[in-house]
Amino acid sequence: MRYLTAGESHGPQLTTIIEGLPSLLPITAEQINHELKRRQGGHGRGRRMQIETDTVEITSGVRHGKTLGSPIAMVVTNDDWTHWTKIMGAEPLPEDVDPNDIKRQISRPRPGHADLVGGMKYGHRDLRNVLERSSARETTVRVAVGAVAKVLLQELGITIVAHVVEIGGVVADPTSTAGKTPDELRAIIEADAVYCADPIASKKMVTLIDETKKAGDTLGGVVEVIVEGMPPGVGSYVHYDRKLDGKLAQAMLSINAFKGVEFGIGFDAAHVPGSQVHDEIIWDEEHGYTRKTNRLGGLEGGMSTGMPIVVRGVMKPIPTLYKPLQSVDIDTKEPFKATVERSDPSAVPAASVVAEHAIAFEIAKAILEQYHADQFPQLKQQIDEIKQYAKEF
């Protein structure tokens, strides 16, 4: 399974095509739109989210609520496009129009963005040509893709949920998720202002976001994705590029502004002896093989163990500041304060939704690589059989 996305932040639309899904998978636009709405929410979002109302149009690959097995194409219209038609139009400029007269051109690259290096790479003197595509607006259709993957996983008995565990140094109590089913956790998160399971930490996060916005600054944080119901053995220890944790790490780090990833206890494993890192194996007739703990986050040897997969990503603060950092004009080479585009004081809650869907796609892709089926019922039968086999092994 694979997908492509196309579209610019202020272009007419965002487009994606997914290839490789089995036929006969039930899917509706409403399921996708629910996830798109979640991406637009969360305390700390900027004014752009008040302009756009992201809804998806499925233009191919689905008929009467079920996949056909052919590529699925989806489109999300940019409502803000009406204000940018002359600036971002695809047609050549009239002969009597000087390109230098086009509004909203950018020659001052913003620190922390793709502006300067992207301009160098592709030869753009107007850096808007870079920021329009490097914008996190592209994650809209990545969430749409992940929403389709989540439907596939749910039908296979695999659930996935993400939540915010830290914003700007305010850390949620790790026990806030203990003992909760994915559905219970999701209900708490979706009702929370910053998608955090700890109500005390959530209030502190909201206050900090508001204070930071007034100061013209931004905040980063940490999000956690939990996957339950995975069959063991997805991935492989045989080759480096088949390791599931490697694929999930790449998926997490491919999200705009993400700079770190860890599984289970992650970097804390460097601080404690092995007896406090590895998970002892147990067996009983009801559950088969499980682990006493889940410090390795459901992954051993590049493969799923059947325990919940727990992966966290670190998002840096958004580099577009209302108190902009110094930059250099690429035309005059003079120092200037960087251009200010619309910005969010914190996009960590929204990033947790993006992370959830990026991981969902990679999990679904790994399953489809391992268990080949043109029709969804065949795939479901294989997953049920492998779970029973692993239990009795």
Image: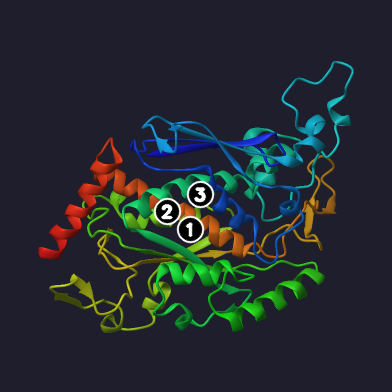
As measured in the structure, the alpha-carbon distance from the residue carrying label 2 to the one carrying label 3 is 14 Å
As measured in the structure, the alpha-carbon distance from the residue carrying label 1 to the one carrying label 2 is 6 Å
Residue 246, x across and y down, in percent = 36, 55
State whether residue 96 is above or below residue 182: above
Give me the residue at 68% from left, 67% from top. Answer: 43
Within the image, what quadrant is residue 268 found in?
A: bottom left
Residue 221, x across and y down, in percent = 59, 69
| Residue farthest along the top direction in this orientation | 95
- Decide: few, some or many residues near mark 1? Use Cα within 10 Å; few <14, some 14-19, many ≥20: many
Is disc 1 in contact with disc 2, using a CB cutoff of under 8 Å? yes
Rendered-image quadrant of the N terminus: top left
The residue carrying mark 2 is 360
Can residue 164 be seen in this snapshot? no
The mark closer to the camera, 2 or 3, is 3
State whether residue 366 is above or below residue 206: above
Query: Which kind of residue does numbered mark 1 sit on?
Result: Glu
State whether residue 158 is above or below residue 98: below
Mark 2 vs mark 3: which is more N-terminal? 3
